[in-house]
């Protein structure tokens, strides 16, 4: 991996040590150029010049093919969405629930993989069953299996929880679910673009991801994967000209039979083009190489952080169980003050509860710092961040 070239491709690296990919990353210049070039053309010619529109629609379908290939799905199984939450909601609202049906989620989920199910408890009488993760940060397959009943319809879980960074055994969870005839939905908001993801190998039924984090697309981008055989079983929340046809003579209404079923109205073309560029960039670098690079940076950062007195790590204690996200506190150091200090030195990290209150309760904390890495970060940037922590600790001791 040519890190110097990657950093040159990424304007953020010239300005900041950026450690907040888990919230949203920064796009490459080429990505932004593709978006602005399209917008410029729309300024000059409008959107609907026939040849330009035809070209635009063809590019959308190319991106669909690219996104599908990236996760080993078929293009027909990919819908463009604006964020991971939307994808999770399309599945939650699309399934034909009966009162008493059950959905299982781990206890580390943030609001986006909790509220859609709690809402279904209120509106359709389903039951949400929460399974506590182990101390390693992983939810055990056996613990999920133990709560499956004949009413269980779905297991919905994050591949990479945002508050712990603990990689989940997606394949094993899906294999167990399949054995019981239970469907699986993976929230890949944090993992897509960081963890190699093959939906055929994992054998999940649905996967929802945003593009703005590890993939480095612009905000308002995402993909939803729906296993082809299940597309027709889901009721689309949004319908209109883009995803249906209506025969006025016969009054026959038909919905798209592909995952386009979940897209309605004029597509968000700039976002989709950005997603295409982002997938192409990740493919160029190689997803395995990305994973290895982030893993190596994570090991480096952890090793250095663990030398700090009062360092408290949350989630998996072993480097092998995690990727990208390092949640921590330093005894006696105010997290928000440290974030501000870092910003003064052009280092961006985040502190907060990350919408994962069960995890905060488990560690008996109300907020944590989160250093979140991506392949474009450097060892020097990590050293610089740690130097700021040391300075802050010394100041507080005085
Ligand atoms: C694990 C996880 N799931 C879901 C979300 C929500 O993603 P989005 O804002 O794209 O809907 C996030 C965002 O931080 C996340 O980290």
Image (cartoon, rainbow, N blue to C red):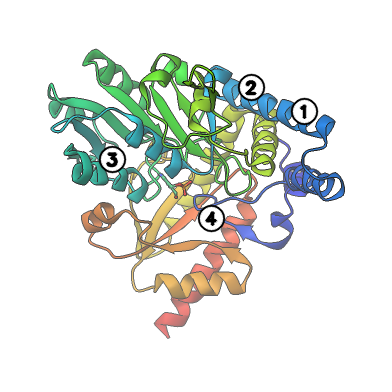
Of badges 4 and 1, nearer the viewer stands 1
* Crowd class of label 2 (few under 14; some 14 to 19; many from 20; radius 10 Å): some
Sequence order check, earlier mark of 2 and 4 = 4
First of labels 3, 2 by sequence position: 2
Q: Quadrant of residue 170?
A: top left
Q: Quadrant of the N terminus?
A: top right
The Cα atoms of the two marked residues, 4 and 1, are separated by 38 Å
Q: If you read the primary sequence from the N terminus, does the residue marked by circle 4 or circle 1 appear first?
A: 4
Q: Which residue is mark 1?
A: 54
Task: Report, in whole angstroms, how far the alpha carbon at label 2 lies from the one at label 4.
Answer: 29 Å
Q: Secondary structure at mark 1?
A: helix
Residue marked by disc 3:
136
In terms of secondary structure, where does tag 3 sit? loop
Foreground residue, 383 or 288? 288
Is residue 38 visible to us here? yes
Residue 240 percent location from the top left of the image: 53, 34
Nearer to the camera, 370 or 158: 158
Within 10 angstroms of label 1, few (less than 14), some, or many (20 or more) residues? Answer: few
Query: Which element is circle 4 on?
Result: loop
Measured along the vertical axis of the image, is residue 380 above or below residue 161? below
- The x and y percentages for residue 181 are 24, 16
How far apart in space, not on screen, are marks 3 and 2 (Cα)? 37 Å
Q: Nearer the viewer, mark 2 or mark 1?
A: 1
Badge 3, how many Cα within 10 Å: few under 14, some, many 20+? some
């Amino acid at each position: 991996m040519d890190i110097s070239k990657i950093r040159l491709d990424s304007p953020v690296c010239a300005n900041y040590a950026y450690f907040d990919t888990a919230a949203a990353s920064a796009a490459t210049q080429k990505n932004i150029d593709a978006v602005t070039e399209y917008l410029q053309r729309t300024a000059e010619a409008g959107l609907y010049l026939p040849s330009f529109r035809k070209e635009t629609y063809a590019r959308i379908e190319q991106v669909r093919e690219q996104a599908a290939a990236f996760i080993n799905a078929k293009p027909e199984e990919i819908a463009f969405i604006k964020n991971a939450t939307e994808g999770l909601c399309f599945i939650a609202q699309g399934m034909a629930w009966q009162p008493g049906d059950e959905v299982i989620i781990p206890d580390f989920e943030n609001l986006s993989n909790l509220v859609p199910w709690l809402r279904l408890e209120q509106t359709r009488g389903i039951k949400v069953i929460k399974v506590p993760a182990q101390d390693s940060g992983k939810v055990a397959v056996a613990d999920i299996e133990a709560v499956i009943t004949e009413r269980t319809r779905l297991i919905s879980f994050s591949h990479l929880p945002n508050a712990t960074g603990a990689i989940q055994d997606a394949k094993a969870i899906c294999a167990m679910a399949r054995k019981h005839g239970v469907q699986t939905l993976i929230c890949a908001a944090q993992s897509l673009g960081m963890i190699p993801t093959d939906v055929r190998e994992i054998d999940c039924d649905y996967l929802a991801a945003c593009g703005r984090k590890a993939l480095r697309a612009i905000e308002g981008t995402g993909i939803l994967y729906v296993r082809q055989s299940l597309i027709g079983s889901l009721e689309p929340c949004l319908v209109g000209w883009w995803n249906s046809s209506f025969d006025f003579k016969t009054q026959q209404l038909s919905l798209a039979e592909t995952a386009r079923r979940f897209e309605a109205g004029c597509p968000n073309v700039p976002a989709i083009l950005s997603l295409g560029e982002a997938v192409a960039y990740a493919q160029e670098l190689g997803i395995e190489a990305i994973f290895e690079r982030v893993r190596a940076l994570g090991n480096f950062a952890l090793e250095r952080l663990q030398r700090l007195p009062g360092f408290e790590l949350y989630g998996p204690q072993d480097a092998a169980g995690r990727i990208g996200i390092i949640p921590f506190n330093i005894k006696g150091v105010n997290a928000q003050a440290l974030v501000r200090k870092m910003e003064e030195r052009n280092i961006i990290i985040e502190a907060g509860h990350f919408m994962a209150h069960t995890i905060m309760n488990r560690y008996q904390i109300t907020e944590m710092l989160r250093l979140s890495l991506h392949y474009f970060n450097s060892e020097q940037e990590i050293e610089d961040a740690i130097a700021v922590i040391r300075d802050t600790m010394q100041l507080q001791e005085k």
